Amino acid sequence: MLRRYALLAFLLICIAGVVLWTRHSPAPTPIRIGVLHSLSDTMSASERPLADSVQMAVAELNADGGLLGRPVEVRVADSRSDAEQAAREAERLITAERVSALFACWTSACRAAVRPIVERHHHLLFYPVQYEGMEQSPNILYTGLAPNQQIVPGTHWMLEHFGKRVFLVGSDYRFPRTANLIIRDLVEARGGEVVGEHYLPLGSRDFADVIAELADERPAVVLNTLNGDSNAAFFAALIAAGLSAQPVMSFSVAEPEMRAWGGERLTRHYAVWSYFQSVDTPQNRRFVANWRARFGADRPTSDPVEAAYIGVKLWAQAVRDAGSDDPVRVNAALLHQSVGGPSSIAAVDSATRHLWKRMRVGHVLPDGQFEQVFASDYPLRPAPWPAYRSREAWQQMLEGAAP
């Protein structure tokens, strides 16, 4: 009997010890990630939803127990629509905040400023926006569309449906100028003509000269590579000039920008992306319902929102596979990842560090949503340098077109 009581007492002491150790043991150290987007100034309407998308994905991870037994913590920084500020914040997040990955940037100017920092630190950047291509970094995963998944097929579609007299308008930095170099090449190869080409500084609202030339030339289609809230002024100027029925394809305007800037007032306004909120899949219906529950029914999703969300999911899978949040080990594991996204499976192409993606063309509706009018039959393999020319030939064209 005494032995039984002694054993019971010993068990009670052990249980009490475990309880006390659990109560007083330190909480697991969080895994930190950095979110670096423009929360103010000209790019904020486009970029704030991307920061929200990353945080929603992280909240889902933490609700499932986090990663490697640790919670994931988000450190958010405002790049203020300025590439130099983005570079400073990237350096701070990596060195001072000790984040394990960066989810960052919209403009190519921002990406170009942050790229040497992540490369120097052997770190990791997830870039969620369609872009002009012509680059590949060992420290960036490009979750947006490559040019052969957006610019090239979108241009072909518009030429086939509206005609070959093309007018180009864009913001004055790397993406629009390089995108329009690709577009001009395609137009001229198909016997078309670029009848006008204008570039304006980010944030510009003076479109008088652009509209005057547009009204004079009456092109078959306008291909729009403006970024940020300059689009609001451009759309308003088109409507004021009686050009609301002018066919326009915008390459950097999705559902949130339509809602913010009134692009739905253009009755023949198109966009080319891989994802639209209206994509009818069970996965997307759940994604949109969760987004609305978190941010409100008046907040639309978009292709960059989906790409930012998928980036977190791919990173999380790579962390699990690597058994570590160390950027070097995670980077190696990333090249073998795929994940079921809201619109389709997103698979990393290890040769290019981009994702296989479908291409979709949407016509804007009066509520600012897009009605899909065309989609590729299957995901397109990414080609940062469009494959109908060699990488060397593209580089020569870029050097010859440098302002």
Image (tube, rainbow, N blue to C red):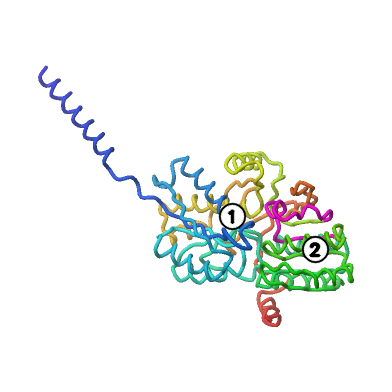
Q: Is residue 66 left or right of residue 305?
A: left
Q: Residue at x 72, y 53 (%)?
A: 258
Q: Nearer the viewer, residue 266 or 194?
A: 266
Q: Of residues 398 and 387, which is closer to you in this image?
A: 398
Relative height, residue 380 to residue 292 (above, below): below
Q: Specify start and end residues of the magenta stretch as a single range.
A: 247-268
Give residue 48's mark: 1
Left or right: 184 as drawn, with respect to 312: right
Residue occupying image coordinates x 77% and y 60%: 235
For the residue carrying disc 1, how many other residues have a C-alpha within 10 Å: few (<14), some (14-19), or many (20+)? some
Question: In front here: 113 or 88?
Answer: 88
Mark 2 residue type: Ala
Q: What residue type is disc 1 on?
A: Arg
Q: Quadrant of the C terminus?
A: bottom right
Q: Is residue 391 magenta?
A: no
Residue 257 on the magenta span: yes
At 26% from the left and 34% from the top, the residue drawn is 19
State how far apart marks 2 and 1 are (Cα).
25 Å
Residue 315 drawn at (x, y percent): 50, 53
Give the percent coordinates (x, y) of residue 178.
69, 72
Is tag 2's residue or tag 1's residue first in the polypeptide sequence? 1
